Image (cartoon, rainbow, N blue to C red):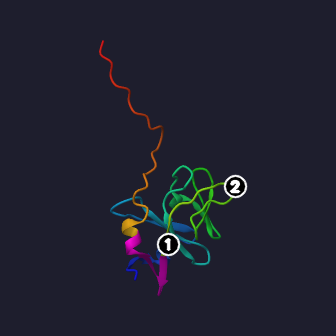
Amino acid sequence: MSEWKKICLVSDIPVLGARRVARPQGMDVAVFRNSEDGVFALLDRCPHKGGPLSQGIVFGNSVACPLHNWTIGLADGCARAPDEGCTPKFAVKVDAGAVFLDAGELASHATELPSPQAGPCQQAAPAVKA
């Protein structure tokens, strides 16, 4: 049996937009609202280069990643062809205008995935003594 955690009201999520839900462990979860008031939740990370999906443009049942315009399905978290890859999705329940996420999933789902790093990630070369 799932324990549901109230996140916000549907009206708190902009139409064709998103809100981020911070977690004590792991990356944020993005909660999206489409034009038909459908509510979806995905890890806030594009499967391509880790772009913040919460900052993307929502259209229909998809979101366009703000970095490289990949189209990600809101229901399944998967990139649309010809692109490939998926981001983890989270269970959502809407009841009486309130949005709930599964508390167990928030605590454990996809917490091991590394956060994206901006810019080149190079280790500094060791100093050479003359």
- Residue at the left extreme of this rendering: 129
- Tell me, yes or no, whether the highlighted magenta stretch contains residue 59: no
Among the 4 quarters of the image, the one containing residue 38? bottom right
Among the 4 quarters of the image, the one containing residue 73? bottom right
What is the spatial separation of the Cα atoms under label 1 and label 2, in whole angstroms? Answer: 30 Å
Q: Give the image location of residue 92, x and y in percent.
A: 48, 76
Task: Name the foreground residue: 77 vs 19.
Answer: 77
Q: Which residues are magenta?
A: 92-105
Task: Name the foreground residue: 10 vs 90.
Answer: 90
Q: Give the image location of residue 130, x and y in percent.
A: 30, 12
Instruction: Say which label, 1 or 2, has the lower sequence index.
Output: 1
Give amino acid for label 1: Ile
Q: Residue at x 63, y 54 (%)?
A: 69
Q: Which mark is residue 13?
A: 1
Q: Nearer the viewer, mark 1 or mark 2?
A: 2
Q: Give the image location of residue 74, x and y in percent.
A: 58, 68
- Residue at the right extreme of this rendering: 82
Helix, strand or loop at mark 2: loop
Q: Residue at x 53, y 59 (%)?
A: 53
Give amino acid for label 2: Pro
Q: Residue at x 42, y 75 (%)?
A: 102
From the viewer's perspective, is 128 left or right of 11? left
Task: Name the foreground residue: 111 vs 51.
Answer: 111
Name the residue beneath numbered marker 2.
Answer: 82
